[in-house]
Image: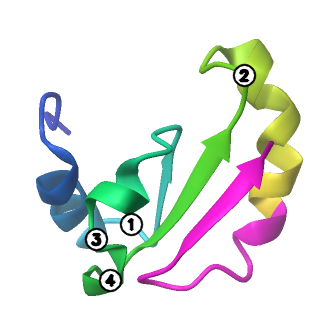
């Protein structure tokens, strides 16, 4: 989508027009941005690292929260 290098606030603004949920491993995003002003939900995957082997065990939890997460809210899965 050619969004590489886009900062968090701008990235959420772009994403809210295209997606319902923003999936990230950035634990600080919800502290740096007022997510409530965006029309997109944020799911933060909290794992030891951001390698596939660290994140893969969280996929089932991510799929479960997708049904309930609401725009403007942050849900954390993992640790």
- Residue at 25% over, 61% down: 12
Quadrant (top left, top right, bottom left, bottom right) of the N terminus: top left
Q: Are marks 4 and 3 in contact (CB under 8 Å)?
A: yes
Q: Residues within 10 Å of mark 2 (few under 14, many from 20)?
A: few
Instruction: Give the labeled residue for mark 1.
Output: 19
Q: Residue at x 17, y 58 (%)?
A: 9
Q: Which residue is mark 2?
A: 48
Q: Nearer the viewer, mark 1 or mark 4?
A: 4
Q: Residues at badges 1 and 4 in contact (C-beta under 8 Å)?
A: no
Which residues, given as a range, are shown in magenta?
64-79
**Which residue is at 35% across, 84% downward?**
36
- Within 10 angstroms of label 1, few (less than 14), some, or many (20 or more) residues? few
Residue at numbered disc 3: 16
Q: CA distance from mark 1 to mark 3?
A: 6 Å
- Farthest-out residue, front: 31
Q: Disc 2 to disc 4, how far (Cα)?
A: 29 Å
Instruction: Report if residue 66 lies within the magenta region.
Output: yes
Per the image, label 1 sits on a secondary structure element best described as: loop
Q: Are marks 1 and 3 in contact (CB under 8 Å)?
A: yes
Whole-percent x and y of residue 54? 76, 20
């Amino acid at each position: 989508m050619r969004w590489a290098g886009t900062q968090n606030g701008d990235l959420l603004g772009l994403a809210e027009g295209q997606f319902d949920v923003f999936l990230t491993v950035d634990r600080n995003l919800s502290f740096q941005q007022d997510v409530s002003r965006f029309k997109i939900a944020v799911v933060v995957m909290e794992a030891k690292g951001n390698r596939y082997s660290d994140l893969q065990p969280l996929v089932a939890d991510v799929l479960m929260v997708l049904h309930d997460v609401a725009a403007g809210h942050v849900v954390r899965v993992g640790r």
